[in-house]
Image: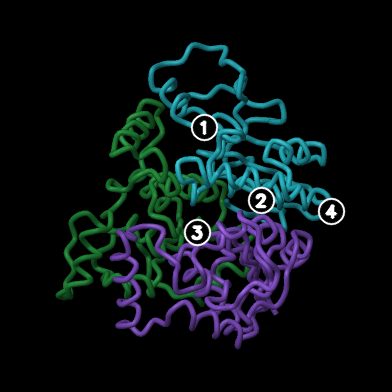
Chain colours: A purple, B green, C cyan
Amino acid sequence: MPKATIVIFSGDLDKALSAFVIATGAAAMGWEVTMVFTFWGINIVRDEKKKAPLKKDFTSKMFEFLMPRGAKQLRLSKMHMFGIGTAMMKKRMKVKNVQGLREFIKDAKELGVKFLVCNLPMDIMGLQKEEFIDEVDDICNVSTYLKEAKDAELNLFI
Amino acid sequence: MPKATIVIFSGDLDKALSAFVIATGAAAMGWEVTMVFTFWGINIVRDEKKKAPLKKDFTSKMFEFLMPRGAKQLRLSKMHMFGIGTAMMKKRMKVKNVQGLREFIKDAKELGVKFLVCNLPMDIMGLQKEEFIDEVDDICNVSTYLKEAKDAELNLFI
Amino acid sequence: MPKATIVIFSGDLDKALSAFVIATGAAAMGWEVTMVFTFWGINIVRDEKKKAPLKKDFTSKMFEFLMPRGAKQLRLSKMHMFGIGTAMMKKRMKVKNVQGLREFIKDAKELGVKFLVCNLPMDIMGLQKEEFIDEVDDICNVSTYLKEAKDAELNLFI
């Protein structure tokens, strides 16, 4: 069974969509897929409503406030145009029967894709694991990632 | 014969140049190279003049109008500076005898690099295959890509 | 011993940090790691103080002036916010005992990571090898890179 790892560094809607198209496509073909969310990419798996159990310091609150929270708040990396471009893209996907990012996340999970979040940027941004969507399997570090990547046929950084 | 796949997600001039330097370099060394144009990267292979045979709806026309059309209209991801930086870079490449993107595309083709365009973003942006430059070999989907990537020594996402 | 190559195209602070976390992590686990600095990524290894021995033409001086010079001048790709976001991130890393980019560079070198700089963008930007930090091992071209990548378990483009 071929293996793939995808590091998602970016928190842009368009890059996230590409990552999930590849991840779900591979999983549907029987590949073993691991997605590693790091840096801005962590915002993709932040839950819209869950609250952090521990009190946050000022900087952590700033990060929480300034960064997009979850799949719905992501923007395009280009042509965002104060929201018009991003809205146009989302509407268009609906018209063309292409599912949204939230549905891709659910599908990926059902197909057995593993979701890991990097501990270092979590720590820097003051995010706690209770703030993530249920689909997240585990927190990881760079050595977990490298062990997965070593045996994989496909390793992407998006 | 080693194999390489390069997914070109980005439509930025600088990233496109890097992708083509690697692709033509590998092909010149006898590698089997496949370039997969997706999302903004599709704009690299849009023909400047060709017309779509089928009538386009409003959103498709908007995408056609808002996105750069072909290699000549691409911009740098940084230092574009209202066109000054991009022009400076292009002039500089000429002075230093580095060929432009259009020449890289021709060279890649002569060296046997395969050009694939992803069907999903084509559909979303309302692009038709008759609008692409002659160098494009085929339309592909994620499973075509994964089959190529599985046996490749080098897989990049740019 | 597993091998990894990381092409650093980007000159953004956040992407550079991610690249060095992976590079030092892999080297610490005994991997043979090569980092290839290209395009904007070359700015990461520019020395803050060293002077070019050969006289520069106008365009080369413009590039020298407009691009960030070395690890300290890099900015975040998102949330730079006129310097506030980048400063917040740097301060935060200090508080959380995450080392800065300059320390990551030193560590990478001590762990045996190889630093290569691409000759093509150097030539275009008019940079001379005497302007780089001492950690840089050599200047390379695309064929050097491909030879390294061919045998590597992990190849990333960041």
Q: Which mark is residue C149?
A: 2
Using the image, determine if residue A145 lies above or below residue C122. below
**Which is closer to the viewer, label 2 or label 3?**
3
Q: Nearer the viewer, residue C11 or C145?
A: C11
Q: Is residue B2 visible?
A: no
Q: Which residue is mark 1?
A: C68
- Tell me the CA gap for discs 3 and 1: 25 Å
Q: Which mark is residue C29?
A: 4
Q: What SS does tag 4 mark?
A: loop
Residue B156 figure quarter: bottom right
Residue in view at x 39 percent, y 67 percent: B117
Q: Position of residue C16 (x, y in %)?
A: 61, 45
Q: Residues within 10 Å of mark 3 (few under 14, many from 20)?
A: few
Q: Which residue is mark 3?
A: A66
Q: Amino acid at mark 3?
A: Leu
- Which mark sits nearer the N-terminus, 2 or 1? 1
Q: Position of residue A45 (x, y in %)?
A: 58, 72
Q: Residues within 10 Å of mark 1 (few under 14, many from 20)?
A: many
